C-alpha cells in the first residue's frame, strides 16, 4: 500500500470535497481517501503509481499539486466510516428538524430572519445528505441529487429575496421579536450540540471538518437573528430582520451555486 499526499489550495468547502470524491471513486487503485479541510490536503492510500491520480486532481483546476508519497500499511477505515455516518445522520436530522420548525415559526411570526435561517439549516442538511451519499452510489445518481438540491436551494433563496423586496417596498410588517429570540436560542443550542457531536469524532475528514465549519457559521447566524430581534424590539422597525434575512439568503445562494458546480463537473 502507498500513501500519497496532495495539497489542494481551493478545497475549502464540501462542494470541492464531493467533487473530488466523484472524480476519484471509479479508480480501482484507490483504497482510502482522507481529507483535511483545515490544511487543504488530501491523503490517498492506493496501489500502483500515483501519477494517474495526480492527473485527475489537476484536471479539476482546484490548485492541486503533489506533496509526498511513501509506503504505508494496510488501511481499514470501516469502523471510522461507520462512526462518521452516525454523526452525519445525527446532524442531518437536527438540521432538517430545525428547518421545519424555523420555517413554520418564521412564517407565523412574519420574520424573514427565521425563514432565511431555516433555509440555511435546509442547505446544511442537503450537504450532509450528499456526504452520506458519497459512499456506494453511482456517479450519475449523486450528480442528479446534487443538481436537484442546488436548483431547489436557488429557488428558495430567490423566493426569499422577492419577499424581502416586497416587504421593503410595501407596508412594513413588524415581526414578533419574542418568537425570533426563543426560536433562535433553541437553534443556537441545536447547533452547539452539533458542534459537540462533530468535534468528538476527532476526525480530519473533510465531511466532518466542513460540518464543523457549517455549524460554527450557523452559531454566528443564530446570534445575528437574535441581535436583529432585539433591534426590532428596540427600534420598532422590521428593517433589521430584513437585513439579516437578506444576508442569510446570500449564504444559501452561494452554497447552491457551489453544489451546482459539483453536479456539472
Image (cartoon, grey):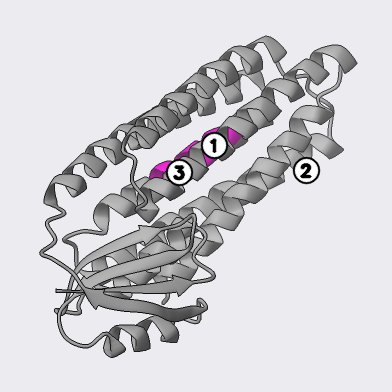
Q: Nearer the viewer, mark 2 or mark 1?
A: 1
Q: Is the magenta stretch mostly helix, strand or loop?
A: helix
Q: Residues within 10 Å of mark 3 (few under 14, many from 20)?
A: many
Question: How many numbered marks have been drawn onto this rendered protein structure?
Answer: 3
* Vertical placement of residue 249 versus 173, above or below: below
Q: Which of marks 3 and 1 is in front?
A: 1
Q: Name the residue under label 2.
A: 165
Residue 78 lies in magenta, yes or no? Answer: no
Q: Name the residue under label 1.
A: 216
- For the residues labelled 2 and 1, the Cα–Cα distance comes to 29 Å
* Vertical placement of residue 113 versus 67, above or below: above
Measured as percent of width and height from the top left, residue 133 is found at 25, 55
Foreground of the two, 121 or 57:
57
Q: Is residue 50 left or right of residue 265?
A: left
Magenta stretch, residue numbers: 117-126
Name the mark on residue 124. 3
Q: Which residue lies furthest to the front in this view?
A: 71
Amino acid at each position: 500500500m502507498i500513501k500519497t499526499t496532495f495539497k489542494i489550495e481551493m478545497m475549502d468547502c464540501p462542494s470541492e470535497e464531493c467533487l473530488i470524491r466523484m472524480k476519484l471513486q471509479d479508480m480501482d487503485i484507490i483504497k482510502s481517501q482522507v481529507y483535511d479541510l483545515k490544511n487543504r490536503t488530501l491523503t490517498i492510500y492506493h496501489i500502483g503509481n500515483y501519477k494517474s491520480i495526480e492527473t485527475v486532481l489537476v484536471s479539476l483546476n482546484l490548485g492541486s499539486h503533489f506533496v509526498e508519497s511513501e509506503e504505508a500499511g494496510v488501511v481499514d477505515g470501516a469502523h471510522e466510516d461507520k462512526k462518521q455516518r452516525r454523526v452525519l445522520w445525527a446532524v442531518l436530522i437536527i438540521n432538517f428538524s430545525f428547518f421545519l420548525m424555523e420555517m413554520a415559526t418564521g412564517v407565523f411570526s412574519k420574520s424573514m430572519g427565521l425563514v432565511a435561517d431555516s433555509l440555511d439549516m435546509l442547505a446544511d442538511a442537503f450537504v450532509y445528505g450528499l456526504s452520506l451519499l458519497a459512499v456506494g452510489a453511482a456517479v450519475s445518481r449523486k450528480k442528479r441529487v446534487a443538481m436537484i438540491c442546488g436548483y431547489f436551494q436557488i429557488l428558495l433563496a430567490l423566493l426569499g429575496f422577492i419577499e424581502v423586496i416586497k416587504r421593503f417596498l410595501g407596508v412594513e410588517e413588524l415581526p414578533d421579536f419574542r418568537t425570533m429570540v426563543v426560536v433562535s436560542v433553541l437553534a443556537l443550542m441545536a447547533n452547539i450540540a452539533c458542534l459537540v457531536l462533530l468535534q468528538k469524532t476527532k476526525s480530519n475528514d473533510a465531511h466532518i471538518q466542513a460540518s464543523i465549519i457549517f455549524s460554527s457559521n450557523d452559531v454566528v447566524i443564530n446570534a445575528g437573528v437574535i441581535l436583529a430581534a432585539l433591534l426590532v424590539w428596540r427600534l420598532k422597525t422590521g428593517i433589521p430582520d430584513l437585513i439579516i434575512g437578506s444576508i442569510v439568503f446570500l449564504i444559501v445562494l452561494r452554497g447552491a451555486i457551489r453544489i451546482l458546480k459539483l453536479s456539472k463537473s
